[in-house]
Image (cartoon, coloured by chain):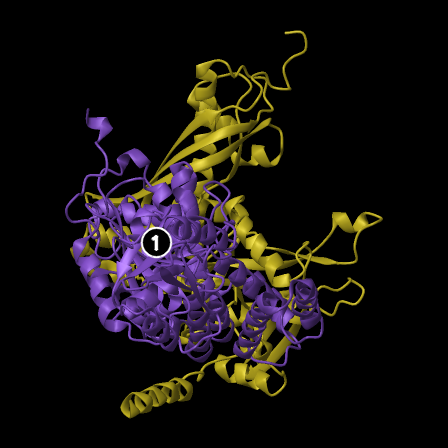
Amino acid sequence: MVSKSLKINKEQIKSLFNNTSDLVVYEFETLNNIKLMICYIEGFVEKSLLDRDIIKPIILNLDDNRDIKKVLYVSNVNEFNSLQEIADKMVYGGVALFVDKVSQCYVVNLNHWDKRSIEEPQSEAVIRGPKEGFIEDLATNKVMLRRRIRNNNLVFEDYIVGKQTRTSISIAYIQDVVNEEVLAEVKKRINWNIDIDGILESGYIQQLIEDNPSSLICTIGDTQKPDVVAGKLLEGRVAVFCDGTPHVLTMPKLFIEDIQSSEDYYSRPFYATFLRLLRINCLLLSIILPGLHVALQTFHQEMIPTVLLTTMAGAREGVPFPAMIEAFFMTFMLELMKESGIRLPRAVGSAVSIVGALVLGQAAVEAGLVSAPMVIVVAATAIAEFAVPALTEAIIIYRFIFILLGGFMGLYAITCGIIVISIQILSLNSFGIPYGFPLAPVNKQGLKDSVVRFPLRSFIYRPKSLEKRNIIRQKDIRKK
Amino acid sequence: MKKVLLLSIFLIITLILTGCWNATELNNIGITLLLGLDIENGKVVLTAEVINPTSAKEKTSMERDYVVKYVQGIGNNIFEAFRDITLKFDRRIFVAHNKVIILGEEFAKKGLIKEIDLLSRDNEERETAYLFVAKGAKAYEVMGINNGLEEIPANYLLKLIENYKLNPKAMNIDIIHFLKDYYDRGIEPTLGIIEKKNKKQIMKMSNTSNEKYELSILGSAVFNKDRLVGYLDGNDTKGLNFIKGRVKHGIIVFPIPETYMDKETVNFFLSKDKIENKDLDLNTLDITKTKTKNDIEIIDGNIILKTNIVLRGMIWEIQEDIDMTKLENIKILEDACSYAVEEGVRSTFMKAQNEFRMDIFGFGDIFHRKYPKEWAKIKHNWNEIFSQTDVEIEVKTNIIRTGLTNIPANNVKGD
């Protein structure tokens, strides 16, 4: 509790912050000898504003009524009694103001810290569409979303999670569009599931509140682009912003979202449909192709066209390993190159790509360690994988599984693997909504924006699985 | 947790233990495209054409190894011969890609159904592999001849077989169709033939290549059940293909009289020896579509075989001086073409009825379908009945296109 005595308050604040060195406690007197004290954390407040709009008017104008609010030139002055609340405000850039003989603390928010400027997110580059991406600062991110949806129905609800880090997160939704069941579920899980000491990235939240922690496929989406989040909110989804992370979570996430791209909606439907078909094929290809190649080579030589078989057999002459080991080796090397390419300093990165291209592409074949068709297969797989970036993590593990299956039991096991994995994926739920929607269960309205993207004017309804109340998206202009 | 771990270990072990039992690496199989079957001193001689995969690697033609290798095995039956090869050749013969099986003439004459059993029972051998008889030769005598541009001799042969669709004077019957005909009482099987021929004219050219022989698949072989009994020449094979409805493309060369006369005069001109003497101007029709309908009828106890062929085609060559812009002239061409086809088909019928005395066309099946009760009585001597029956042939030609010119090159000067 805030006491009337400045001295006690000073002791309390100092002990609350454990005498930390970046806590600034400054005592001063006004012209008519009223004692005051301000506390803030160094580097979190804008000092010029503090001097000009708080200290100066107080020193000049504060009278014996000790009514601070009458003299301050700032717009947000809050009164607090609990020291813990004061501390919470101070770590977000608040300046605590104690007046002698007043048992209340005034907190003025003057937060100011260095932020990264808004840039185009590297992992989600687009040709057409807004180029800006979220940054680490929560308030800026909120503004970016609000600029997309200038509507009083856009609601942010703030929570503080993480027992040690006290990270503020924010749930965003559009009041009369959001699916209330999902929203309630999200709030419930944030309140109940998160008891961790630290939230350093939105990935922590993702892992703590997702439906299927043991599944390879994540049922919470993330994006760095405000326009994507806006689009998801308009379909009735909920977004979770996390301070310190440029990745915003959207939920529920359905399978079909991974093959959609924001650009699909900005370009005309025909090419968008083509791209979606391409992405689906890439997805299948990048999972199955190496396994299929191994299975055909070791078990089903009769299924390969004769001319191709002779070429493949020729390429395999002198290769010492079985096809499965070969596929494993090449896929492993590919992942190795990807991983080291990301981690290495940029100056060395080009060296890695040259070494990789030479070693994997040419030298390995010429040295007779791998066959040329395997290099082509793995390269094709790698390219296909990048077409579906959201699923990369799952794809790579599934790919290794399929190489094992294909190498041990051929097409039979590959077929079984496809069946088992399909069943597993289709049995997933994301916040109460089936992951396979609208493909399984089939929904006619939803199919208009699935593999085929229909023209925008035919999106009369919001996705039925998500949206329960405000279902009409636009009038059917063709019926007028 | 322990249970889950145990279960997953079990699953992985079962995967590893049961898996791979029939895994074969590509380096361990010898891909065979062509098999030859012969019989010598009562033993089966099996010749296989195995691709040498290293030759598929990119090398300059100087360094190249032989593209294929031939391996031979001898045994009491085919399988023993196959296993005989394993002691002489380092790779297992892999016959799933086998395209053609060549039967030596002696082998075919001895009867081959017992040996075919392996080929249809084996899970590797495809029933779509073509069966061919090496006319007047051992199978291994015709293997290895490559007069084409294909590197692999088997592919050269296969391309020849595919050319059947351009020229229906040959047969392409695969194992499954041979077996179908063999088990059917109403038809006797026929197979394609391969002949090794000396290159005559072309060897006289100065810059000719050193290959002395070429293969030809002209003609077909006639079987009595599973025994080779004789051969049909190219024209009769074409007639056979017409009756069986197997003609897709091909050409018909036919003459027409110089003046447009009535049908009897046309018939006079079309008599066969005249064509061979090359007295007449010959015209060519390229077939685009044919449809054959065979029927059988019993009128007063007499069996009549009926064949109705409808042709559609375009005129490719006219050596006559004939005005193609007139509809009645096209009609005459159509009639002349029909007559030529009819003559060819009739000759094939004559051969089957008089020489082989066997139903190689499948009229027995039609009889069976149409008169099932009577069939039960006569099926045991259907071939004898067949050779006594009357034949009615009806051919209709539709000319749909006449090429780029209306006036023949042979147009009288100044007219």
Residue B320 position (above or below residue B29): above
Position of residue B406 in the picture relative to residue B187 (left or right): right
Report the residue that reaches farthest toward the top. B414
Percent x, y for residue B62?
Answer: 81, 64
Q: Label 1 belongs to which residue?
A: A257
The amino acid sitting under disc 1 is Glu
Percent x, y for residue B163?
Answer: 55, 49
Report the residue that reaches farthest toward the right. B206
Which image quarter: residue A32?
A: bottom left
Which color has been applied to chain A in this rendered view? Answer: purple
Quadrant containing the C terminus of chain B is top right
Quadrant containing the N terminus of chain B is bottom left
Q: Is mark 1 on a helix, strand or loop?
A: helix
Position of residue A7 in the picture relative to residue B219 (left or right): left
User: Toward the viewer: A286 or A374?
Assistant: A286
Tell which chain the image draws in yellow. Answer: B
Local crowd at mark 1 within 10 Å, few (<14), some, or many (≥20)? some
Residue that appears at 44% across and 16% down = B328
Which chain is indicated by disc 1?
A: A
User: Toward the viewer: B279 or A57?
Assistant: A57
Position of residue A195 in the picture relative to residue B101 (left or right): left
User: Toward the viewer: B378 or A85?
Assistant: A85
Percent x, y for residue A430?
Answer: 26, 62
Residue that appears at 25% across and 55% down = A437
Percent x, y for residue A449?
Answer: 30, 45
Residue A50 showing in the rendered view: yes
User: Toward the viewer: A383 or B394?
Assistant: A383
Residue that appears at 30% across and 50% down = A69
